[in-house]
Amino acid sequence: MKRADFLKKLQERWPESIQDERNENGLEVPAQAIPEALAYLRDDPETRMNYLDFITAVDYPPDTMHVIYSLYSLDKQHRVQLKVKLDRFHPTLATASHLWTNAEWNEREVYDLFGVVFPGLSDPRRILMPEDWEGHPLRKDYLHPNLASKPD
Amino acid sequence: MGLIDKIPAYVEKTPGGGVLMTPLNWVVNNVKASSLWYMLFGLACCAIELMATGASRYDFDRLGMIFRATPRQTDLMIVAGTLTLKMAPRVKLLYEQMPDPKYVIAMGGCTVYGGPFYHDGYSVLKGVDKIIPVDIHVAGCPPRPEALLHGCLELQNLIKTEKLGHKRDRPGLRHLTAGTVRPSGLVVPDSMRVVQNS
């Protein structure tokens, strides 16, 4: 399936879905469509996205945070990436760990480095940084005493 | 080896102890220098070069260097690779578990000063000599086995200058402990703080 077919399918249920112009496989869905949109793409016989590549996030100051789900179908061998726009001060997104088990570690990583909270995650600890670490290092406004900036 | 450092206290009571000391010093130093058992651990890509140095082409064994899988049996710690702040307390603990006399080689740019992670790196310790005393720094990213072998030979020369009953100064230590190096972290302004939904 091509991106336009995915878009048509998603727009039937979530009419706000649009194309992501920066990404040839990308679609943008509203945040409240997660995780139903992911479950729909996984279980629909035409899409069957049975493999979650990764979950990542991009911080866009001053007020936006993007979370990106990359899905792949091992049966149909097609790929789609769903982007969700969030408020970067209170980024909250429903967990997808009941759909793919590897989503749990991916979501812990996104929480650790970007501070996106996934309610419903069974083990919401940090995964990479020490447990007593403060702050989320991949945010653009992150500061740290250990951080020496590069000279120009 | 810790025991043998105490020997001068007994020997020097005998008349002419000084005459005996020099050959004894020579024997002990050569024994120490030619059986440097190193700890089997690597942290990043430098560990690959460490393995290559240990394998047959470069052959650490001919220097009497054999890896041991426990700190209790090792004389030398080769810190091979990027030391992250999360790992730093563990490495300090391993160092403290080694019996005296113990030596440290900092292998590669990361262990010398932070390497490529010096700028814009928040998670990497900028030099292992902030937490443990380092005897030899080996530069390179990663250093070739020849460089590491050179470092080991230099360490052997260093050991051969030691005197029984005297602890050698280690100028490499920057007198910081893992505890102080551990980050206190960012103070997040309230406007930026992420609200945890409970």
Image (cartoon, coloured by chain):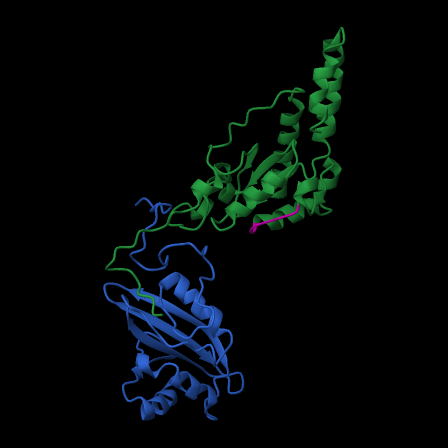
Chain colours: A blue, B green
Horizontal side, residue A75 vs residue A126: left or right: right
- Numbered range of the magenta stretch: B40-45
Residue A67 image position (x, y, % from top left)? 36, 72
Front residue of this view, candidates A95 and B50 = A95
Residue B119 in percent (x, y) is at: 38, 46
Left or right? Give the position of B58 relative to A19. right
Q: At x 46% / y 42%, what residue is drawn?
A: B179
Residue B90: % across, % down:
55, 47
B104 magenta-colored: no
Q: In percent of the image, x 29 and y 56: which residue is there?
A: A141
B96 on left or right of B29? left
Q: Is residue B44 magenta?
A: yes
Among the 4 quarters of the image, the one containing residue A94: bottom left
> Do we see residue B143 in this rendering?
no
Which of B198/B66 is in front? B198
Quarter occupied by residue A27:
bottom left
> Considering depth in this image, is A85 or B131 the residue closer to the camera?
B131
Q: Would you place residue A51 above or below residue B25 in this image?
A: below
Q: Is residue A64 above or below residue A48?
A: above
In percent of the image, x 72 and y 42: which residue is there? B66
Residue A105, image x, y percentages: 48, 69
Could you tell me which quadrant the C terminus of chain B lies in? bottom left
Main secondary structure along the magenta-highlighted residues: loop
Decide if residue B131 is on the left or right side of residue B48. left
For the N terminus of chain B, the image quarter is: top right
Is residue A116 visible in the rendered image? The answer is: yes
The quarter of the displayed image where residue B126 is located: top left
